[in-house]
Image (cartoon, coloured by chain):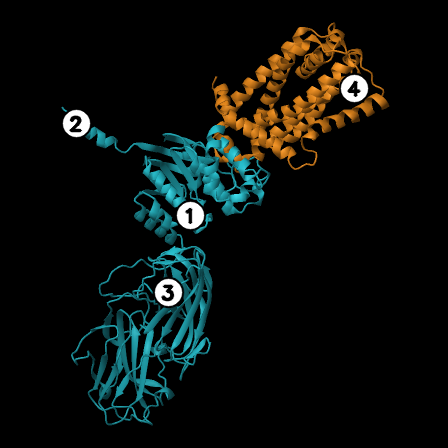
Chain colours: A cyan, B orange
Amino acid sequence: MITYPTEAGTENMQIKAIELEVIDKKYPLAKNQGRNMDINFEDFWALKGISFEVSQGQILGIIGRNGAGKTTLLNIIAGTLAPTQGKVLVKGKVLGLFNLGVGFQDELTGRENIFLNGAILGASREEITDKLDSIIEFSELGGFINMPLGSYSQGMRLRLGFSIVINLDFDILAIDEVLAVGDALFQSKCFERLMDFRRSGKTLIVTTQDMGLIERLCDKVVLLDHGHLSYSGQPPEGIDRYRTLLNTEKFFVGPVQKSAKLIENTKKWADNTSEWGKELGTREVIIDSVKFTNKFGWRSSRIRSGEPLKIKVRFSVRNSVKEPHFGIAIFRSDGVYCYGPNTAFDGYNIPELKPGRGYFILNFHKFLLAPGEYRLSVAIWDKNETLAFDYHDGCYKLAVNGKNKARIELLNIPFKFYPRDYIGFTVEHKCEPDLSGLNDKWGRKTGTEESRIGSVKFLNRLGGESSVFTTGEPITLAVNFNGLIRGNKNCYLWLGVYREDGIYCQGIVRKLNNKSRFFKILFPKLFLLPGGYRVSLGVWDNKKQEFIMCHHAAYQFRMVFNKEDHGTVYLEHRWKYKLPSMP
Amino acid sequence: MGIINEIITRRNLIRELVLKNLKIRYSKSLLGFLWAFLSPFLIVLIFYVVFSLILNVKTREAPFVLYLMSGVFSWRFFQDSLISSTTSLIDNKNLIRESSFPHYLIPLSIVLSNMIDFLSSLIILLIVSLFVLQGLPYFVLFLPIVLVIHLGICTGLSIIFSILYVKWRDIKHILEAVLLLLFYLTPAFYSLYLVKASFSSLLFRVYLYNPFVGVLNLYRSSILKGFYKAIQSEVGIVPLLFMPLGFAIVVLLLAFYFYRKNKDNINDYLSY
């Protein structure tokens, strides 16, 4: 058999710089450290069965939650910690840049620390003397270089430490979560230098919580979860998995939904009303204030149903975050999810939030929720809605006033009633059918012969019958009584729209007269969100306080939508925002 | 010998560590390096007042002040090295955790920086001795060898105790008590003949085989003119030279063996 050297060459193109084989690391939780004997002394396995390799010239990112074992792994690669089991192969000289202040002596000046730190990192005095100028120059410390290190800020320590390390000779450089301390200018300088290293074939390993940095910098990521290797491979997927990991650990909220097709169902209930009032999130962005403004422009957490509402949220950004979006969710006080618009669903593309202050405004043109008490959640989160930067869950109360507070319906969608309402006829609010007797009796029809109902039809905008509608379409409910209803002096027509899970969305009550056998109810824009709905029809005798007839939830229709949204009702709205800009 | 190679390749680090220790010790004080001389002399002064003027202690071997200085200086070198080395790995965990250099360089650097203090006071002692006794013994040529033996004992014990302390913090308090006891068991401020007079001859021989007694006798023999003559009849070559030398070698070998065994898990304990 002939083997071609070129083939063998391609095999070896990628020289392994680091190889880890089934690394375990156990920390002794020493029994003779202190005397708190009530603590359960068990060995702590910081790393379990970690294997991966890094090729020369690659930049490896190690990601994971705090305490996942990132620093331990980095220390093992750098040779500062020995694995309990397993094999570490590292080719070439490794330098490490770990916690700030490590390797420095506060009593010595910056310059003296360069010599000490350089010596610790294995450089000879000549090498340090040669590179002293470039180290000082890169650190931009100027006159501070002759000041004792104790007077340095964290950022200055980072600059000094980083300058020393990168000016010395190495093959592999390990950097632990320290870059974030530097200012933007220094960070970009470091970033450039790291890219130079990659080009010159040096191998870099970084750990950071800055996923943006990982995405820009790394060729490969390793995701650690409680000491186990959860993923090793391409950065975008690793980052996604990390975010999912954060999600599963209850960091946040909400499903990852992705499809631009017709949406058939949306979220109906709050995740957990007991979580209301909590503030979650990574706090990279902080929601400072949330203010409600009514139609007069007054600040008020009380508005009238059907009137406009403006919500203004001020926030401050601590760390820049990529592709954020803003979201506000409205719940009824019992946890029914009314509506949860966000800028991602509405197609706003915010590439980045830079540090500073900003605000966003959500304007509802008509707040179509029925009178009652509501709770609002406000969130700023990442593009997949898996990682909340800040999330105030049900923290804000909003009261909606209206004509009739006693009603248990959810919505107040405008409609027209035919035959036309006239003055003296629209007395619907004086009467309220008692619906408690209808519980759990879906599809049940009761009633006397004479009040039989021929049909309830759902008509679309062209007058044709249909059972599927798109959110925002006009819908006409055509009600046809076969026989006249006798003894109807105190009789009222009741029409109820229910959501499939039993939530009473909207009720319409009109006094019956002797003349009409046909009624039409037109919703010019039925803003129900995707899902199944049912309609009930009844005749309520207000004197006897009972239904003469009732077809409870006997008529069904579905709503679909071409856009993703959360909740029960679509409320027309507009977003406005002002993002922080760098000074 | 891997250890010797390691020390040679890391000589720059050793120098920087020694410089660091000295700078930290003296840079902020008004009198600075002068304290390296002042503090041992203050102790000598106190001992002199207590033992010579008040208790009227006499030494046959040499003038009491010289006798006292040689004893106190060399003892202080040993004791200071050991005490500050013991906590040194913990004190310097910042330095150790960042890099993979051998841990024993830290106690070694402390012993070396203490030796620099010691050397300066030793020079003064030599000068004083030269004038007071009108000359130096021929053994002064062996002083470097004596120093190396002493350095070996200090380094070895420092390394052992610094590693022990990482895992067993009580060792520091035990060490302090043991050092005090050892100090009284070493003829720093009393004459060997006083011991001979109060101990049985067997106990006296045992006493002489204490390596610290041997080291002190070596120092005095090579600095104080006429000292060796005075003890020649009592102290043989074995307890005088071979006992300290052997002890130094054993302690050093033990130290490096102990380090080899523990080097992989020292850093684990440093995090606490």
Horizontal and vertical percent position of residue B247:
61, 15
Chain of the residue under label 1: A
Mark 3 → mark 2, Cα distance in angstroms: 60 Å
Against A505, is A275 above or below?
Answer: above
Q: Which residue is mark 3?
A: A327
Circle on res. A4: 2
Given this view, does label 3 or label 1 mark the residue nearer the observer?
1
* Residue found at x 65% / y 14%: B143
- Tags 4 and 2 both on a single chain: no
- Mark closer to the chain start, 2 or 1: 2
Chain of the residue under label 4: B
Quarter in which the N terminus of chain A is drawn: top left
Horizontal and vertical percent position of residue A393:
43, 63
- Observer-nearest of A325 and A579: A579
Given this view, does label 3 or label 2 mark the residue nearer the observer?
2
Q: Secondary structure at mark 4?
A: helix
- Mark closer to the chain start, 3 or 1: 1
Given this view, does label 4 or label 1 mark the residue nearer the observer?
1
Circle on res. A437: none
| Mark 1 residue type | Gln
Instruction: Assess disc 2: are there few (<14), some (14-19) or many (≥20) residues with their C-alpha within 10 Å of its C-alpha.
Output: few
Chain of the residue under label 3: A
Q: Which residue is mark 1?
A: A187
* Residue found at x 71% / y 23%: B181
Asked if marks 3 and 4 touch (Cβ < 8 Å), the reply is no
Asked if marks 4 and 2 touch (Cβ < 8 Å), the reply is no
